[in-house]
Amino acid sequence: MFKSSHSGGNTTECVKCAYAPHRTLICDSKRGGGPVLSVETAAWRRFVDALQQGT
């Protein structure tokens, strides 16, 4: 997994992602044993693109 480049520097706003075949895994780094969200990679890409466009 890798930490988002937009995560807060004070460790209060950190998202980690990992790419798996046809999936993207997302978790809150503050909750090491917490849940992992699994979404289709294409859906994650659309979400990230929308954030970058401000929509």
Image (cartoon, rainbow, N blue to C red):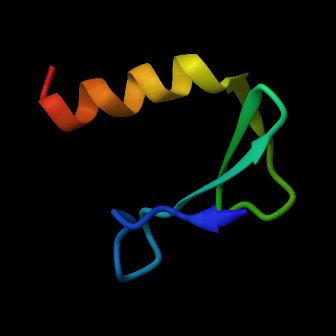
Q: Is residue 32 visible?
A: yes
Q: Is residue 30 visible?
A: no
Nearest to the observer: residue 2 or residue 37? 2
- Left or right, 23 with respect to 29, comes to right
- Left or right, 24 with respect to 42, comes to right
Q: Residue at x 44, y 69 (%)?
A: 12
Q: Residue at x 49, y 63 (%)?
A: 14
Residue 27, above or below 21: below
Nearest to the observer: residue 33 or residue 44? 44
Q: Residue at x 31, y 29 (%)?
A: 49
Nearest to the observer: residue 35 or residue 21? 21
Q: Residue at x 64, y 26 (%)?
A: 41
Q: Position of residue 37 (x, y in %)?
A: 72, 33
Nearest to the observer: residue 14 or residue 44? 44
Residue 6, above or below 25: below
Residue 7, above or below 10: above
In the displayed orientation, state which residue is furthest to the left. Answer: 54
Q: Position of residue 5 (x, y in %)?
A: 39, 67
- Left or right, 6 with respect to 54, comes to right
Task: Assign the C terminus to one quadrant of the image.
Answer: top left
Task: Assign the N terminus to one quadrant of the image.
Answer: bottom right
Residue 14, above or below 39: below
In the displayed orientation, state which residue is furthest to the bottom. Answer: 10
Q: Within the image, what quadrant is residue 13 found in?
A: bottom left
Q: Position of residue 17 (x, y in %)?
A: 64, 52
Q: Position of residue 50 (x, y in %)?
A: 27, 24
